[in-house]
Image (spheres, coloured by chain):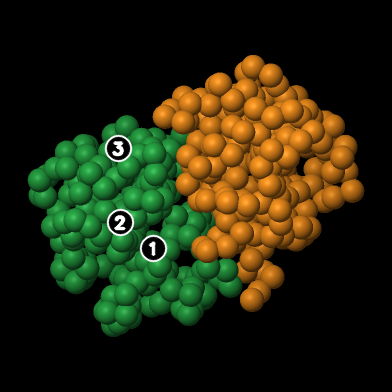
Chain colours: A orange, B green
Amino acid sequence: MREFLVIFNEAPTTPERVRLKDLPGSGRFDLVCRVTTQALLYSHGVRTDSVVHLLLRGPDDPPKLITVTGRRVRRLYPDERTTAIHLRRALAAEPGTEPHPGFYVRRLDLEELLDELSGATLYYLCEDGKPLEEVDPEEDAVFVLGDHEGTTPEQDELLRRRADAVISLGPVPYHADQCIVIVHRYLDVRSGP
Amino acid sequence: MREFLVIFNEAPTTPERVRLKDLPGSGRFDLVCRVTTQALLYSHGVRTDSVVHLLLRGPDDPPKLITVTGRRVRRLYPDERTTAIHLRRALAAEPGTEPHPGFYVRRLDLEELLDELSGATLYYLCEDGKPLEEVDPEEDAVFVLGDHEGTTPEQDELLRRRADAVISLGPVPYHADQCIVIVHRYLDVRSGP
């Protein structure tokens, strides 16, 4: 199972804050949407071996964790707007429920989630890490990354302490959704056809 | 210079056909937008060494070629909606003009564009090609790919004839925007910091 955990410190946690006509101005909700689709979709298919955890920590009701599971998800399309509508519905729902198939929302912050995932191999994606090819990460693992502003110093410290390795994807700083594409492709090629 | 040429056989060529509330239903215009941004943006920056050619061949006024140039582009944001608005403006403009900085629209089809690019090394991205790492493509090159439906048999034949190599990115069929991320990252790592 490939799991991705992306930390969005400014992304909204109430549906009213998600404006479909201005996703970038809605705490960079466009990035939350792209992370979801790039983690779970390839051409004409859903990655049923993948899961993405979206940790939203912005206004007005943080934290909320939305976990989207490839094996369960229905009607996930690659565009931002449709995905934003699914995620907004998850923000409107009671924590602990699955308001749309494959979208599970909970009240959980980073440390609790890391505790829950503690059996898994954990990789923290950060620009000062070791090259991806050198670490050669396991297939069954959790890849953790920050959003466009990165992680807070506290989150960074916690992740470095808990991670099995810190991974850098190259000399260019990528968007979180681009990082996910790169990790998927690395593992796809290594797994073979 | 890294150039990408993506062929969208169904993407609209008139602004009325681009519905911001339904980009996927607008001839998969969501993919046109993501191709644009993934070709030209990284985290907090524009790739000034990159150009993307969007060959649109759908209704009602095909063909139209929109070339977006990293060195010239202004106000390019990573979300689909803002990019769709820029591209729609290009579709409303007279061919041969640049209605928004860095967005140049022309009346040009595939063969004419390939003639124009004939000095450059051409790579055709296709699932039956040679592995990316084996081809080890040049930095200054044009990477050509199809949209979610691929190329037509005529386009495919033309591209195989004109390409210096046919490249496969791995065992999974990727979206065109994901292909671009993968090629960029390969070249980024090889170029080094």
Q: Residues within 10 Å of mark 1 (few under 14, many from 20)?
A: many
Q: Residue B37 lies in what quarter of the image?
A: top left
Residue at the location (48% across, 60% down)?
Answer: B175
**Labels 1 & 2 near each other (Cβ < 8 A):** yes
- Quarter of the picture holding the C terminus of chain A: bottom right
**Chain containing the residue with disc 2:** B
Q: Position of residue A154 (x, y in %)?
A: 75, 24
**In this view of the protein, can residue A95 be seen by the observer?**
yes
- Quarter of the picture holding the N terminus of chain A: bottom right
Choose between B92 and B179: the one closer to the eye: B92
Choose between A99 and A87: the one closer to the eye: A99
**Chain containing the residue with disc 3:** B
Who comes first in sequence, dot 1 or dot 3? Answer: 3
- Left or right, B74 with respect to B175, comes to left
Q: Tell me which amino acid carries mark 1.
A: Asp
Residue located farthest toward the top when viewing the structure as drawn: A60
Q: Secondary structure at mark 3?
A: helix
